[in-house]
Amino acid sequence: MNRGVAFVFPGQGSQYVGMGRELFERFAVARSVFEEANDALGESISRLCFAGPSETLQLTENTQPAILTVSVAVLRVLQSEGYDAANFFAGHSLGEYSALVAAACIPFAVAVKIVRARGRYMQQAVPAGTGAMAAVLGATPETIYEACLKSVRDGEECSPANFNSPGQIVIAGHATAVDRAILWLKDNGAKRVIKLEVSAPFHCPLMLPAQEKLAHDLQAIEFADLQRPIVSNTDAAVVRRGAAAKIALVRQVSSPVRWQETIEVLAREHAVNTFIEIGPGKVLSGLIRQTARDVVCEHVEDIASLEKLTIGHLVR
């Protein structure tokens, strides 16, 4: 096993209509993943992935199982082609479920039902229009914390939600507080602030009702110890035990995603120098390059990217 390799899995926001279709059509192992998801959910998630409509795919309760299914299908194709040499897994928020499936901690059919419920709980936690998120470019964590502190009024919430890379941090909370924070950040040196098109303010204390419901569901599910470790994005810690993985998934719902630290732990403390992004899109590859500049990043999501994969030493 090449000890310098990590497989990483994307989270919500990477979805698009048509994702996974090529692999489904060419590879039996990919088809079996989609069929397993369809059976587990009692509906055709494959049809939604391949044909949309986009507005239905964008619903959080659909987005989450769809991305998980595509990511695991890509993983199974890679494994069937002999690419199975990673010694670490990690996933951005939702992507941590894909990482745990890869690590044989939870079966895929169980995971896809969990994330369907997770998405529904997160959507229900905050009334539509009440919350918001914004991506901030070119501001320090200290500036972000100050902006959030100055923006809240009368019990409102506003806090960092994603520490994605140096210079890219996402904030979340009540829409009114986020709007104030945006104005303050623009006046205090942020290079750019982008209001995000999201259905709920993820990874902030407003998600605590969803976290409580998910914790109840997860209590009934057995998590096996991991065959290979992950680095959890809740606290950037290496996780090898199933019990610890479950706790991290619960805390993750209302805690910020520490993706920058996750990559730094893998690259600096565990000598990972090759990252393969597995699943729709290549957002994580860009974030990884911003965080650890002397590493190799590749992504696989379709036939073209599979054929371009140049990491020949990963095969067996």
Image (tube, rainbow, N blue to C red):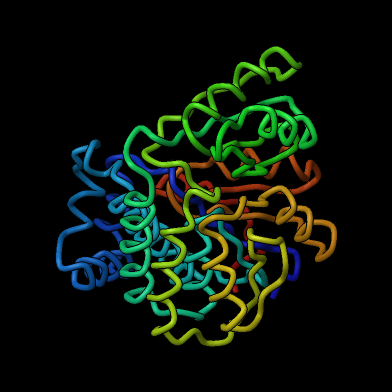
In the image, residue 201 above or below residue 273: above
* Percent position of residue 25, x then y: 24, 56
Residue at left offset 40%, top offset 75%: 216
Farthest left residue in view: 43
* Percent position of residue 36, x then y: 25, 72
Towards the viewer: 172 or 288: 172
Farthest right residue in view: 268
* Percent position of residue 295, x then y: 76, 48
Residue 310 horizontal side relative to residue 10, left or right: right
Residue 98 horizontal side relative to residue 266, left or right: left
Towards the viewer: 244 or 229: 244
* Percent position of residue 61, x then y: 30, 53
Residue at left offset 64%, top offset 70%: 230
Farthest front residue in view: 154
Residue 103 horizontal side relative to residue 31, left or right: right
Q: Quadrant of the N terminus?
A: bottom right
Q: Quadrant of the C terminus?
A: bottom right
**The quadrant where residue 287 appears:** top right
Residue 303 horizontal side relative to residue 257, left or right: left
Towards the viewer: 145 or 112: 145
In the image, residue 149 above or below residue 21: above
Q: How many marks?
A: 0
Residue at left offset 48%, top offset 66%: 97
Towards the viewer: 290 or 176: 176
